Image (tube, rainbow, N blue to C red):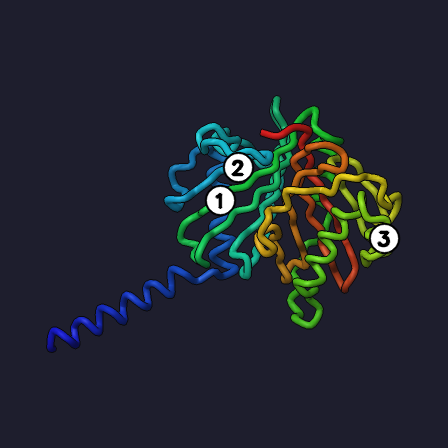
């Protein structure tokens, strides 16, 4: 084989490897989320494959990974992850209700360049004793009963546009008097805010009144969301400025075009 032919073979192989490493699939996103969960269970992050530009953020403040909650081992009572192949990101909720320091946590994991071989950002909202409406045992009891069966029928999956609209509409209710009525509330839907339970979801909603919009929705129009059409869910990490500078995660599930579940995790202070 000539040197030119050999060079072409190596180029072809390199191209295939590059394509494989850049694939952002549902399976690879959930595998990366599981690696994060495994690290959280042990408090050991050595197995995580981090990019050279990796950042760790906790309660809207960047900090060293070694100083993060992830380096403390927890017994996890509930773990659930969703995947967004368009934004190349995942969202994981976990609850630890035992021990002296219970937590309810929402974490977005992001990968640059559509490449899940390394993690670019771990962005965590962590609530614990003393945070807004916090009671991990109550929250666990509510969420364990929920049905998160995947929506396997493509025709029944909510669109990304609808999920974005619902997520933004929910966060806009405190400043926009029309936002609450723009959301397609289900008749049998459950809202768990910290440990406060409301059924139906559309009951007792704000209709404006605050002059401060909820900000820090992760400025990029794609990357402020983790949208999973298979689960019919959207998660937005933000700062709940309408009520104070509170780090916050809002996750909403839509089934058959209507809001089915709402989860909020809200810490009272940054960092």
Mark toward the start of the polypeptide (3 vs 1): 1
Which residue is at the front of the view, 194 or 210? 210
Q: Residue at x 69, y 35 (%)?
A: 266
Question: Which residue was labeled with disc 1?
Answer: 121
Q: CA distance from mark 1 to mark 2?
A: 8 Å
Please indicate whether residue 135 sits to the left or right of residue 229 in the image. right
Residue displayed at 63% across by 31% down: 103
Q: Residue furthest top?
A: 100
List the residue tagged with mark 2. 57
Question: In the picture, which quadrant includes the C terminus?
Answer: top right
Whole-angstrom CA distance, mark 3 to mark 1, is 34 Å
Question: Which element carries disc 1, helix, strand or loop?
Answer: strand
Residue 62 pos. (x, y %): 51, 34
Q: Secondary structure at mark 2?
A: strand
The location of residue 163, given as percent across then percent down, is: 70, 58
* Residue 196, image quadrant: top right
- Of tags 3 and 1, the one toward the viewer is 3
Rendered position, 15 above or below 236: below
77 lies above or below 10: above
Residue 81 visible to the viewer: no
Residue 101 at x, y = what percent?
61, 24
Answer with left or right where residue 84 lies relative to residue 113.
right
Label 2 – label 3 distance at C-alpha: 33 Å
Locate residue 65, reporting x and y percent. Answer: 45, 33
Q: Quick check: marks 3 and 1 in contact, CB under 8 Å?
A: no
Q: Residue furthest right?
A: 204
In the rendered image, which residue does mark 3 sit on? 178
**1 or 2: tag closer to the N-terminus:** 2
- In percent of the image, x 55 and y 51: which residue is there? 90
């Amino acid at each position: 084989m000539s040197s030119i032919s050999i060079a072409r073979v190596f180029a072809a192989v390199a191209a295939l490897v590059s394509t494989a490493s850049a694939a952002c699939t549902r399976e690879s996103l959930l595998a990366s989320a599981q690696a994060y969960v495994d690290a959280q269970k042990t408090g050991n992050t050595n197995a995580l494959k981090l990019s050279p530009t990796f950042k760790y953020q906790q309660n809207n403040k960047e900090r060293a990974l070694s100083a993060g909650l992830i380096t403390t081992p927890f017994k996890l009572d509930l773990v659930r992850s969703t995947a967004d192949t368009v934004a190349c990101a995942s969202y994981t909720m976990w609850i630890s209700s035992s021990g002296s320091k219970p937590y309810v946590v929402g974490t977005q994991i992001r990968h640059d360049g559509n490449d899940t071989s390394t993690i670019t950002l771990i962005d965590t909202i962590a609530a614990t004793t003393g945070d807004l409406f916090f009671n991990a045992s109550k929250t666990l009891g509510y969420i364990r009963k929920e049905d998160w069966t995947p929506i396997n029928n493509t025709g029944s999956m909510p669109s990304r546009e609808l999920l974005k609209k619902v997520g933004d509409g929910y966060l806009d209710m405190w400043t926009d008097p029309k936002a609450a009525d723009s959301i397609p509330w289900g008749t049998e839907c459950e809202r768990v805010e910290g440990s406060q339970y409301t059924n139906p979801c559309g009951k007792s909603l704000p209709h404006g009144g605050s002059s401060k919009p909820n900000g820090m929705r992760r400025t990029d129009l794609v990357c402020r969301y983790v949208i999973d059409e298979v689960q019919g869910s959207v998660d937005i990490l933000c700062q709940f400025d309408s009520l104070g500078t509170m780090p916050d995660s809002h996750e909403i599930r839509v089934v058959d075009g209507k809001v089915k579940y709402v989860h909020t995790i809200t810490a009272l202070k940054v960092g």
